[in-house]
Amino acid sequence: MPSEPALLAVDWGTSSLRAWVLDRDGAVLRRHAEAAGVGALKPGAAEAFFRARIVPALQAEGLPALLCGMVGSTLGWSVAPYAACPADGDAVAAGLVPVGERIAIVPGLRCDGPFGAPDVMRGEETQILGWLAGDPARRRGRHVLCLPGTHSKWVLVEEGRVVRFATSMTGELFELLRRQGTLASDAPADDHAAFARGLIAAGDGGALAARLFGVRARAVTGAMPGTEAPAFLSGLLIGAEISSLSRLPGFDEGPVHLVGAPVLTGLYARALGPRPHQEHEGEAAAIAGLLDLSRRWSHP
């Protein structure tokens, strides 16, 4: 017997969306992805786009739907207030915001950041819940997660709850610096040797603005070919993030679980060097997290 569709699961960010039709066990029956993030939509257009584009594309009419990511921000469909840390799956499920018949948006998380300011996330909380759902042992003890991306997250999980986290704008800085200003370059960022030299140049992660100018100085003096600059910049930024955040209390012990796109987790795995680490596929974690929340969700 073919599996019956049970849930429309959507990860809808600022620049892109991914959506899946799942059966009751979480198997993907249909999938859809496109560069149609909420940041590109007109204010108030997310609901109409969801109903006219996403639902028909996946033949998901009548299915319950859970949406996570920036669709729950001021840019998206409806604001889903942040749940306060420490938070587990039940706390996140309690904050689901209904936006239609059997349609709800997942709240993000907030905590007191390590540098005197609040910190927030949207979308990553679902990947964390999916990672926790992957093995009952992960709900016991203390674990350090790193979710690399536009805004990378370092997360401390204790006894199945997100206790606190810290965000680094590493991916956003990389894109801005390679597209604009004196470090701009059209060269690819896939030079492994240049990336490794960037990691070394990151040092302890301090004086980052000065270290960044060193990328240009190396290029204009001939100390480094200009074509190597993007990969060197990538290594410098990722190395600075890891050197500074991985030493924070709570993040400085035990293996690091890298959750995200394989191309990014691979770079972070190289940067972590001898520290124990494991890579976990981010899309699978997002799907598992949305499925986990659907099982905690009370809807008609």
Image: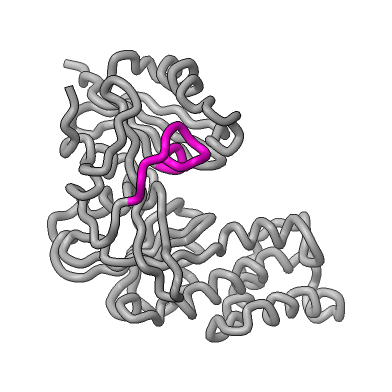
Residue 287 higher or lower than 272, as above or below? above
Q: Is residue 233 above or below residue 137?
A: below
Residue pushed farthest right?
221
The segment highlighted magenta reads 69-82
Identify the main secondary structure in magenta: loop
Q: Position of residue 230 (x, y in %)?
A: 70, 64
Figure quadrant of residue 69: top left
Taking 110 as reference, is 93 left or right? left
The residue positioned 81% from the left and 66% from the top of the image is: 182
Inspect this view and state whether residue 90 appears: yes
Q: Position of residue 100 (x, y in %)?
A: 33, 22
Quadrant including the N terminus: top left
Q: Residue at x 40, y 31 (%)?
A: 19
Q: Quadrant of residue 217?
A: bottom right
Tell me the residue at 32%/40% (across/down): 106
Residue at 53% over, 38% down: 16
- 261 over 198 or under it: above or below: above
Give the vertical position of 172 relative to 66 (above or below). Answer: below
Tell me how the rendering is colored.
one colour
Choose top left, top right, bottom left or bottom right for residue 119.
Answer: bottom left
Q: Is residue 70 magenta?
A: yes
Image quadrant in which the C terminus is located:
top left
Left or right of 276: which side holds 38? right
Q: Position of residue 178 (x, y in %)?
A: 72, 59
Q: Is residue 270 left or right of residue 43?
A: left
